[in-house]
């Protein structure tokens, strides 16, 4: 009986230790996953901001799907921000004339037809055969402005685009990019991206509690942007002057941890932690305070607007 009692005590102790270690392991694993998710999300958003204006800034005032500025901000001090960036991020193919036997010396000035070899399995119809998808850019080019596909100008059979506007010189191997207006926002706890072409919001990164932006430009008119002081939450009326963006991203773990409460040291156990991000303050409610959180930020110079 004594031996059985001792063994029972030992077994209970070991099981308790294993259970605590298992909980600690899963908690640490959740934190690591959350931090990695935050870094991935931040890297994606930073890249999108850095490349804003590529292939469109020279004539963005003409408008792409209603957007007449490279930077289009929606600021809120009571909810996550959203941001629409116009850019030619997506390479769709290269200029390629199948009738050119040298496959390298082809060069011509054209007012209309552009022969393109598409990347991957998508077609011109996938990229451009819609009034909301008609914008593209050819690089390298003298102009930094976008071109538009003419009505009915998509020819998948002969691999040619017909464009609107003045003549341009195209060469074998020039890159062809689709130009889009990308809207970043928070929807149902995820960062979503919407290309404003009718496809709706697509999940970009999951498990994000808040997304905030601040904008930098030469606000005092001295000819230089001061990254130490010239930041504003709302750039309304100054979007065309913005040269840098600060990104604040609050991620949370994928699953709640019932043994954890996200609190300040002096908070009561019933209160959720407050996060003040730019001009927005979040107080975690009962459904959020058992999640681990991780706040990251980055400052991004917009490459195509800084030269």
Image (cartoon, rainbow, N blue to C red):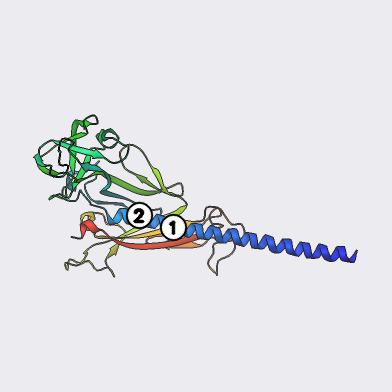
* Residue at point 24%, 29% (across, down): 157
From the top left corner, tell me how far across and down residue 277 is, in percent. 40, 61
Residue 38: which numbered mark, if any? 1
Point out which mark residue 266 bears.
none
Query: In front here: 199 or 240?
Result: 199
Q: From the image, which quarter does the C terminus lie in? A: bottom left
Relative placement, left or right, of 294 versus 164 is: right
Q: Position of residue 134 (x, y in %)?
A: 23, 37
Query: Residue drawn 72% across and 62% down?
Result: 16
Q: Quadrant of residue 30 in the image?
A: bottom right
Distance from disc 1 to disc 2, alpha carbons, whole Å, reads: 11 Å
Up/down of 298 relative to 190, above or below:
below
Which residue in the structure is indicated by mark 2?
A: 45
Can you give x and y, in whole percent of width and height, for residue 223 in the image? Answer: 16, 67
Please, what secondary structure does the residue beneath circle 2 have?
helix
Pointer 1 local density, CA inside 10 Å: few below 14, some 14–19, many at least 20 = many
């Amino acid at each position: 009986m004594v031996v059985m009692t001792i063994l029972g005590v030992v077994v209970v102790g070991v099981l308790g230790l294993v259970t605590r270690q298992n909980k600690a392991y899963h908690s640490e694993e959740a934190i690591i996953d959350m931090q990695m998710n935050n870094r991935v999300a931040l890297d994606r958003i930073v890249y999108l901001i850095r490349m804003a204006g590529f292939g469109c800034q020279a004539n963005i005032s003409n408008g792409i799907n209603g957007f007449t500025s490279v930077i289009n901000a929606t600021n809120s001090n009571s909810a996550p921000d959203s941001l629409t960036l116009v850019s030619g991020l997506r390479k769709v193919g290269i200029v390629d004339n199948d009738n050119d036997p040298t496959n390298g010396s082809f060069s011509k000035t054209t007012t209309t037809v552009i022969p393109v070899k598409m990347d991957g399995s998508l077609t011109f119809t996938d990229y451009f055969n819609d009034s909301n998808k008609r914008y593209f850019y050819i690089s390298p080019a003298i102009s930094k402005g976008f071109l538009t596909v003419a009505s009915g100008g998509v020819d998948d059979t002969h691999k040619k685009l017909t464009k609107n506007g003045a003549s341009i010189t195209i060469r074998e191997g020039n890159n062809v990019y689709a130009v889009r207006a990308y809207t970043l926002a928070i929807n149902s706890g995820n960062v979503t991206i919407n290309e404003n072409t009718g496809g709706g919001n697509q999940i970009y990164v999951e498990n994000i509690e808040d997304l905030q932006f601040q904008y930098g430009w030469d606000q005092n008119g001295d000819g230089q942007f001061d990254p130490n002081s010239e930041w504003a939450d709302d750039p309304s009326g100054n979007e065309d002057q913005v040269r840098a963006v600060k990104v604040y991203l609050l991620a949370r773990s994928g699953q709640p941890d019932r043994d954890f409460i996200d609190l300040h040291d002096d908070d009561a156990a019933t209160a959720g932690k407050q996060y003040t991000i730019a001009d927005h303050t979040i107080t975690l409610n009962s459904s959020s305070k058992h999640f681990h959180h991780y706040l990251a930020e980055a400052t991004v110079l917009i490459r195509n607007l800084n030269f």
